Image (tube, rainbow, N blue to C red):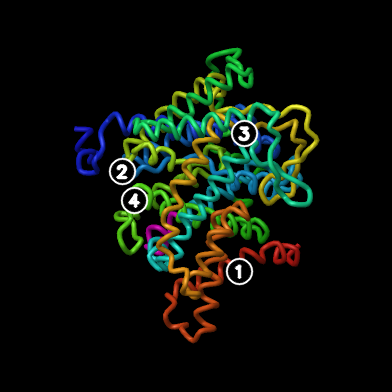
């Protein structure tokens, strides 16, 4: 039976809770169906094909995660990774390499991570992380999610000198976000199941009443599979995947692999803490199943032409609604599969609200590529849910021993590094490197797990990658 397969009774949940949490997770992630192709298309990837690849890739991997790992972790094309692929690996408007070769880079890095999982190295690295850094990762990701929610809702906006400032309260997006936040708080206070979902629906209804989002001009659109199997397309008579083996692209494989590796690690630890399946040592039981599926997600994303498909921190929204089993991502995956045929309809909730009459500029990822703000969209309908989820993930900060400098300073750098660099992996890198250095300076180098030295050295190499690439070129 389904109940026994997903161990619903054992984990203290039921069908209704898991289905509602799966719907909530989908609604907080649905924006990726439109944002991902919008970014990838800048590098020449067909928009319609990328939209189909994004929806189908998420559907396949969410269902695989639910069935194979039975954990409440949903998957989709990773933000940040898609921008890095578009603007640094492929190059703006195909200035460097064809997009098919860029997808081959993703496919190869996924294959390498898959081999690391099979050898047990990835699991060993996760087990080698000090407990207080694991706690800090969850807190840092909570702040990260909050920052994303505040930015997507327009409550904070970029500023030229102070970097961020208070948003414009004359904009409807701000009020939609606030309606979403307070609706969720009301439903949580009433102890209603599905408070996140109800809050998103409340914000969506408000957005419609305010004219911020409109009914779709059409309901369905036939999927476009033109980007599928891109790594094995022929470019100038050669398979795209064969062009990866050059010094510059191999360095790109390394950089993206390291980011993918630790983004997933942070997400799994953070969601695991929230869902209650992390033990007292900070370890996730049967973690290898999660890691196998996640590594296959990167390969699948490259194969389909959707960029790397990875574990999504928005899964926390579903967990906050009570999701505890793999049935949650299965429901999310099924909704992504349906969305592949109904992208215009999904755009009503998952899509954004266009920002009018603005001259501000938004920076995309680490690329330095900017677009005028009146050409991008905010996502206030789901922003409120992300803000509340960020709050819910802060509780483990109390378990960090702040009076112990050796333990607390690396945790502190991890916490601030994740939101301030807009990267889970970069924040983890700050924590790892500082942990190793502080222990060594205090004469406690032998207390550091050998893998921490190896991984910290890899992070140093990643941070120096721009300099290395400049020297190679």
Q: Is residue 152 above or below residue 391?
A: above
Q: Is residue 322 above or below residue 472?
A: above
Helix, strand or loop under label 2: loop
Q: Is residue 335 above or below residue 126?
A: above
Q: Which dot, 3 or 1, sits closer to the camera?
A: 1
The quarter of the rendered structure image containing the C terminus is: bottom right
Mark 2 sits on what residue?
70
Foreground of the two, 56 or 419:
419
Mark 1 sits on what residue?
460
The residue at the point 58 percent across, 54 percent down is 256
Segment colored magenta: 114-122
Helix, strand or loop under label 3: helix
Left or right relative to 468: residue 188: left
Q: First in sequence: mark 3 or mark 1?
A: 3
Determine contact: label 4, label 2, CB under 8 Å.
yes
Q: Is residue 121 above or below residue 364?
A: below
Locate residue 158, reporting x and y percent: 72, 44
Q: Is residue 120 magenta?
A: yes
Circle number at residue 409: none
Q: First in sequence: mark 3 or mark 2?
A: 3
Locate residue 435, reporting x and y percent: 51, 73
Between the C-alphas of marks 4 and 3, the distance is: 29 Å
Q: Is any part of residue 443 visible from this angle?
A: yes
Q: First in sequence: mark 4 or mark 2?
A: 2
Circle number at residue 37: 3
Helix, strand or loop under label 4: helix
């Amino acid at each position: 039976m389904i109940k026994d397969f997903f161990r619903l009774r054992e984990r203290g949940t039921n069908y209704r809770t898991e289905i509602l949490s799966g719907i909530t997770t989908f609604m907080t992630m649905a924006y990726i169906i439109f944002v991902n192709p919008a970014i990838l298309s800048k590098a020449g990837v067909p928009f319609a094909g990328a939209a189909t690849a994004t929806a189908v890739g998420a559907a396949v991997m969410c269902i695989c995660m639910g069935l194979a790992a039975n954990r409440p972790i949903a998957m989709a094309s990773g933000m940040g990774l898609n921008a890095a692929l578009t603007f640094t690996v492929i190059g703006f408007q195909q200035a460097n390499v064809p997009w098919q070769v860029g997808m081959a880079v993703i496919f190869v890095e996924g294959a390498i991570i898959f081999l690391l999982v099979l050898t047990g190295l990835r699991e060993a690295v996760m087990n080698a992380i000090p407990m207080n850094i694991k706690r800090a990762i969850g807190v840092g990701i909570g702040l990260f999610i909050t920052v994303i929610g505040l930015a997507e809702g327009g409550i904070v906006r970029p500023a030229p000198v102070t970097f961020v400032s208070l948003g414009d309260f004359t904009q409807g997006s701000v009020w939609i976000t606030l309606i979403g936040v307070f609706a969720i708080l009301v439903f949580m206070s009433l102890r209603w199941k599905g408070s996140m979902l109800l809050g998103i629906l409340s914000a969506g209804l408000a957005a419609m009443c305010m004219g911020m989002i409109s009914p779709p001009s059409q309901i369905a659109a036939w999927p476009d599979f033109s980007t599928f199997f891109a790594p094995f397309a022929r470019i100038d008579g050669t398979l795209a995947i064969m062009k990866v083996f050059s010094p510059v692209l191999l360095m790109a494989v390394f950089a993206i692999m390291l980011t993918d590796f630790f983004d997933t690690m942070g997400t799994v630890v953070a969601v695991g803490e929230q869902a209650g399946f992390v033990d007292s040592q900070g370890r996730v039981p049967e973690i290898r199943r999660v890691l196998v599926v996640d590594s296959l997600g990167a390969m699948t994303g490259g194969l389909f032409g959707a960029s790397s498909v990875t574990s999504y921190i928005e899964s926390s929204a579903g967990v906050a609604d009570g999701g505890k089993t793999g049935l949650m991502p299965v429901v999310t995956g099924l909704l992504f599969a349906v969305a592949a045929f109904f992208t215009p309809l999904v755009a009503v909730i998952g899509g954004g609200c266009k920002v009018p009459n603005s001259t501000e500029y938004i920076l995309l990822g680490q690329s330095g590529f900017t677009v005028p703000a009146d050409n991008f969209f905010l996502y206030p309908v789901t922003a409120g849910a992300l803000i509340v989820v960020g709050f819910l993930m802060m509780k483990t900060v109390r378990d960090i021993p702040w009076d112990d400098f050796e333990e607390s300073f690396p945790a502190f750098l991890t916490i601030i590094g994740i939101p301030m660099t807009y990267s889970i992996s970069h924040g983890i890198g700050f924590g790892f490197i500082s942990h190793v250095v502080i222990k060594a300076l205090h004469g406690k180098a032998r207390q550091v797990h050998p893998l921490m030295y190896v991984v910290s050295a890899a992070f140093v190499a990643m941070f120096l990658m721009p300099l290395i690439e400049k020297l190679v070129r």
